[in-house]
Image (cartoon, rainbow, N blue to C red):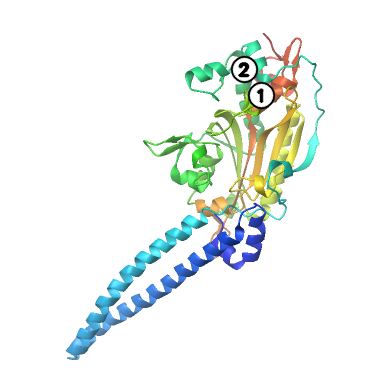
Amino acid sequence: MLELNFLREQREEAEQRLTKRNIDAKALLDTARELDDLRRATQTDLDARLAELNGLSRTIGDLMKAGKKDEAETARARTTDLKAATASLKEKLEATEKALQDHLCTIPNAPSAKVPAGRTPEENITVMQEGAIPELGADAKPHWELGEEYGFLHMDLGVKITGAGFPVYSGQGAKLQRALIAFFLDKATEAGYREIIPPHMVNAESAFSTGQLPDKEGQMYHATADGLYLIPTAEVPITNLYRDEIVEAAQLPIKMVGYTPCFRREAGSYGAHVRGLNRVHQFDKVEIVRIEKPENSYAVLEEMVEHVKGLLRALELPYRQLLLCGGDMGFSSALTYDMEVWSAAQKRWLEVSSISNFETYQSNRLKLRYRNTDDKKPKLAHTLNGSALALARIVAALLENNQTPEGIRIPKALQPYTGFAMITK
């Protein structure tokens, strides 16, 4: 959630940045200002009446002692009126504060100065591209056909057990999944990230704190009997470890990594572009999360991007880095890079990672602050996260790009984890 002081005191900058998202930023900020003005005026009125009430309470006793009964009765009548007025003002203040808070929750994060304006994914900027694009024969198959032919990926069994979008892996396919998870976790811990195994369900407060609620409520699976949500990413429970915390500056940076299954309803997703593993309701992902001082966060974002690039190079996958335009960014992000790999059989790019800096947007909701030794009061930290990596589309690209007449080749870096160099029939 954007800080109210930023919206008031740096109104021009806030409006300019929010306009990159192709929203009516002026109307959003005008409403925020009006609600905050009403809140301030109501608070001032309430404070004045409470001060008068307190003063009269002391005066009545003095008047009675002085034998000024009529004046004391007049003061008592005034206190009755003031009590009714303060009760009404307290209700008004509470309602105004709630309306302001609810409205602030509808305002997305302000894109950073580096984010380009734009409405659609076609307006994202390609920052760089690396790796040779594989040239496959005319008989090359997409991953869903390869999985069926080799007998390790079963989309139909997932439909039988649960429904569409819940894949089943077996044999070498299951080992490949496990190998990728271990490989990604090992690389992250080597880079100094502390491994976390978090819960796979969170409460509403956790989902709100990282920006999933109320923005993405329809995209999450909701266990209504207990009011819990299946996590769409490990970012949610891992970042919430530090909700309502004040950390000492010496503890920063905080670097965490976690593997979890991820659950997304992906409502309304249909068509050939979502076949097989391209878009599923359950998939595995390793996520890296950082908590940083504001002055370090953008250098750290580039460091996280380099970490993901290293994983893609090790997997021998051609990839490209995109800087997302304002209209294609997530609700809570200030800047996002997407990493995409080339799917040789489908002849299209597949997103496998988003790496984002949220600045103080999440930490303001989380009430996550840090304190320097000479600070009079704590400051909001910056939070960042990135997929390192999401498995479903990585698996799709690995299968398609490495298909040969003898089988599906496993990249050398992954072979110590799989225990085999080739997926065979």
Residue 168: quarter of image: top right
Q: Residue at x 19, y 89 (%)?
A: 70
Question: Where does the image place residue 340, in percent across and percent down from the top left?
Answer: 71, 34
The number of numbered discs placed on residues in the rendered structure image is 2
In this rendering, is residue 252 above or below 65? above
Of callouts 2 and 1, the N-terminal one: 2
Circle 2 SS class:
helix
Q: Are marks 2 and 1 in contact (CB under 8 Å)?
A: yes
| Res. 356 visible in picture | yes
Work out whether residue 170 or residue 244 is closer to the camera in this orientation and state it.
Answer: 170
Pointer 1: what residue?
395
**In the image, is 87 to the left or to the right of 34?**
left
User: Which amino acid is tagged 2?
Assistant: Gly
Q: Which residue is drawn at 65% across and 30% down?
A: 184
User: Which amino acid is tagged 1?
Assistant: Val
Question: Where does the image place residue 188, in percent across and percent down from the top left?
Answer: 65, 35
Q: Which residue is drawn at 64% across and 46% down?
A: 329
